[in-house]
């Protein structure tokens, strides 16, 4: 365990200093600040717009950070040859991979936390008439983090057998497909006029089953899911967190099986 | 987690830091008693060219053994298959055929990894870390913690002459300083077998000399070193045996002394008239005869019979013998001769004279 911790902390330190990731973080922070600055001119603006904009900015910046980080975690180590000095030490390949993943995840967590805290404070100061910390925003940020954990696991899994360039498009394609889970679900079912072929239905069913349902994690965003009413929010969040953890573990398991046989 | 790494015995040795010659450890890291530290049997490694889809044989059926405590020079031009072989010995790539063993076990075995170390060519480390943090990072991978780790890190930083720069981030380091960090990380576990890939590449003369001295020191401590280097004078000085690899095959292997033995002798004669009879006699017994000014320089085999035959011709011509000088071959001569032989075999020799004439 100490080996994984050592590798994760090394990865975290290196990733937090990556300029391209810092750019996404600073742009997102600037957008949140600007949003509150402009919103102060129209204090009556709707909380729905505020929530949708804030969570949208955090989610998009988070996706870019997760993808760019995830696709490079392993290839960077190979390109720069740090992997040789690490794997020639008593480090098992699965420890290396898990350490890299956890270091990347910690980086995503800190980035999301910074953006989330700034947004929650902004809402409390400028939008909430009673200046309360809104729990529904924190829940939304938490869901975004677990969505990004999935993105990170996907990117790491693809990175053990594809180049960063291919991986970038592959991970984004899966993310976009997974964000439209309600559409793939509908296309996988019977059409209203019954004209959809069984093959097409089967393909969309398979996509809906295999691709992670990223859309489920955006439930706090009122613009993406305007009509959704959840009876038991705590249970819904817990179920989705469990889903993200299990799916990520499966991705990591596949990555470990491939990486164990990969030459570096 | 097992921790076979031992700590340095005496911090007083750190005084020899600048020259990298302090003791690395007490040398008690012993668990393997076999004769050979490294065994390679019929190793074959092929790679597929992703564009042409053709298979390229990087290492072609090589076999060699390195005894414990031996310093073995693994030589060859670029692309000969040296790094591929080292990677196979470290378990980073897998053989297509043949077997490799380090300390009697398969490479990649975690117990073996506690007793070996690797210094890659132009090593790169996490740039945000300082030299101390990097060494501490690698020490942690051996399960070292707390005061023991701190002591070892301080000792190694001192040993490689980075005491004053130990807390600076690596992004501010020169290539030579990074190489020193690389050396320090390779000694963190007090290794029994070390794999050094071009340890002196691109270094200034002082850093170069320090690293060569360190290798000699490691040799005196009885460690096994598998050294890949283009610095043939260093290899000649520090290695017990060498192999010369060309196009994935071992073309020559043996003790350095044996390989450079059997050189030539240069005999200079005065008052020697190169008439037809003398010239014919030299042609039969010498390799080269050249008139330089009033003197004649004759080169022939260094063995006693060849030397005496040349001297007899000079005496018979009633000339004066000015000097008899053995011309020692260097490892560089052997290396070039071997590689050229391989090139000619493959029809690849670069004929500069022909190129100049065309």
Image: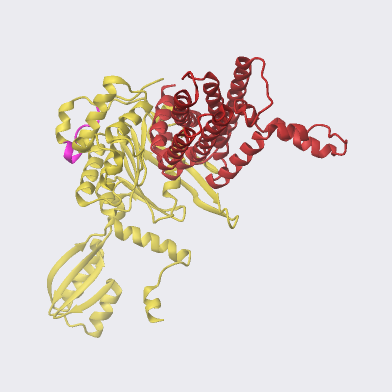
Q: Nearer the viewer, residue A87 or A100?
A: A100
Q: Is residue A244 left or right of residue B346?
A: right
Q: Nearer the viewer, residue A246 or A193?
A: A193
Residue, x 40% and y 28% (percent of image)? A9
Task: Please give the letter of the chain rendered in red.
Answer: A
Residue B103 appears in the figure: no
Q: Which residue extends farthest bottom?
A: B276
Q: Colour of chain B?
A: yellow
User: From what the image shows, is residue B157 above or below residue B249?
Assistant: above
Please state the horizontal and vertical placement of residue B287, each as a whole percent of the image.
28, 71
Please state the horizontal and vertical placement of residue B320, each as a whole percent of the image.
11, 75
Q: Which residues are magenta?
A: B17-25
Q: Is residue A71 left or right of residue A186?
A: left
Asked if residue B22 is among those painted magenta in the image, a careful observer would answer: yes
Q: How many numbered marks are there?
A: 0
Q: What type of secondary structure mainly makes up the magenta span?
A: loop
Please state the horizontal and vertical placement of residue A82, each as a whole percent of the image.
40, 39
Asked if residue B70 is among those painted magenta in the image, a careful observer would answer: no
């Amino acid at each position: 365990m100490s080996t994984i911790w050592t590798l994760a902390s090394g990865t975290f330190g290196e990733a937090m200093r990556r300029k391209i990731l810092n750019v996404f973080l600073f742009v997102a922070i600037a957008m949140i600040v600007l949003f509150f600055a402009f919103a102060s001119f129209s204090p009556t603006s709707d909380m729905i717009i505020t929530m949708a904009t804030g969570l949208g900015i955090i989610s998009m910046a988070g996706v870019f950070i997760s993808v760019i980080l995830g696709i490079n975690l392993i290839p960077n180590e190979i390109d720069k040859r740090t992997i040789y000095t690490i794997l020639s030490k008593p480090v098992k390949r699965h420890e290396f991979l898990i350490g890299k993943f956890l270091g990347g995840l910690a980086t995503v967590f800190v980035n999301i936390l910074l953006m989330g805290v700034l947004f929650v404070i902004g809402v409390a100061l400028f939008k909430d008439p009673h200046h309360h910390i809104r729990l529904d925003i924190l829940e939304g940020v938490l869901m975004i983090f677990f969505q990004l954990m999935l993105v990170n696991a996907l990117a790491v899994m693809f990175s053990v057998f594809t180049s960063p360039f291919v991986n970038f498009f592959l991970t984004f394609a899966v993310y976009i497909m997974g964000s439209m889970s309600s559409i793939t679900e509908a296309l996988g079912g019977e059409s209203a006029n019954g004209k959809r072929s069984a093959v097409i239905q089967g393909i969309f069913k398979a996509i809906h089953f295999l691709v992670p349902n990223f859309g489920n994690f955006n439930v706090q965003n009122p613009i993406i899911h305007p009509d959704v009413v959840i009876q038991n929010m705590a249970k819904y969040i817990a179920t989705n967190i469990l889903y993200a953890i299990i799916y990520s573990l499966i991705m990591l398991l596949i990555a470990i099986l491939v990486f164990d046989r990969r030459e570096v | 987690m097992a921790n076979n790494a031992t700590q340095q015995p005496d911090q007083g040795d750190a005084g020899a830091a600048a020259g990298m010659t302090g003791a690395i450890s007490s040398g008690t890291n012993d668990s393997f008693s076999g004769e050979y530290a490294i065994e390679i049997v019929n190793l074959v490694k092929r790679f597929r060219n992703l564009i042409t889809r053709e298979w390229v044989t990087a290492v072609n059926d090589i076999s060699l053994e390195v005894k414990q405590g031996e310093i073995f020079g693994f030589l060859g031009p670029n692309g000969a298959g040296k790094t591929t072989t080292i990677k196979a010995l470290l378990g980073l790539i897998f053989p297509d055929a043949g077997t490799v063993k380090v300390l009697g076990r398969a490479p990649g075995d975690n117990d073996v990894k506690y007793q070996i170390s690797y210094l890659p060519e132009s090593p790169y480390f996490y740039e945000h870390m300082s030299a101390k943090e990097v060494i501490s990072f690698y020490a942690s991978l051996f399960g070292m913690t707390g005061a023991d780790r701190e002591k070892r890190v301080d000792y190694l930083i001192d040993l490689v002459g980075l005491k004053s720069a130990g807390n600076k981030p690596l992004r501010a380091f020169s290539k030579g300083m990074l190489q020193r960090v690389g050396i320090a990380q390779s000694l963190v576990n007090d290794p029994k077998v070390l794999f050094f890939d071009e340890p002196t590449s691109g270094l200034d003369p002082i850093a170069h000399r320090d690293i060569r001295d360190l290798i000699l020191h490691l040799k005196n401590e009885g460690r096994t070193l598998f050294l890949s280097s283009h610095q043939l004078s260093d290899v000649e000085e520090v290695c017990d045996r060498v192999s010369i690899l060309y196009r994935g095959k071992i073309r020559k292997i043996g003790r350095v002394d044996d390989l450079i033995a059997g050189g030539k002798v240069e005999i200079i004669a005065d008052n020697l008239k190169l008439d037809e009879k003398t010239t014919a006699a030299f042609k039969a017994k010498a390799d080269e005869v050249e008139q330089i000014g009033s003197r004649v320089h004759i080169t022939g085999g260094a063995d006693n019979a060849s030397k005496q035959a040349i001297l007899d011709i000079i005496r018979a011509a009633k000339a004066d013998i000015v000097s008899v000088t053995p011309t020692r071959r260097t490892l560089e001569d052997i290396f070039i001769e071997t590689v050229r032989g391989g090139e000619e075999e493959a029809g690849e020799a670069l004929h500069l004279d022909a190129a100049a004439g065309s």
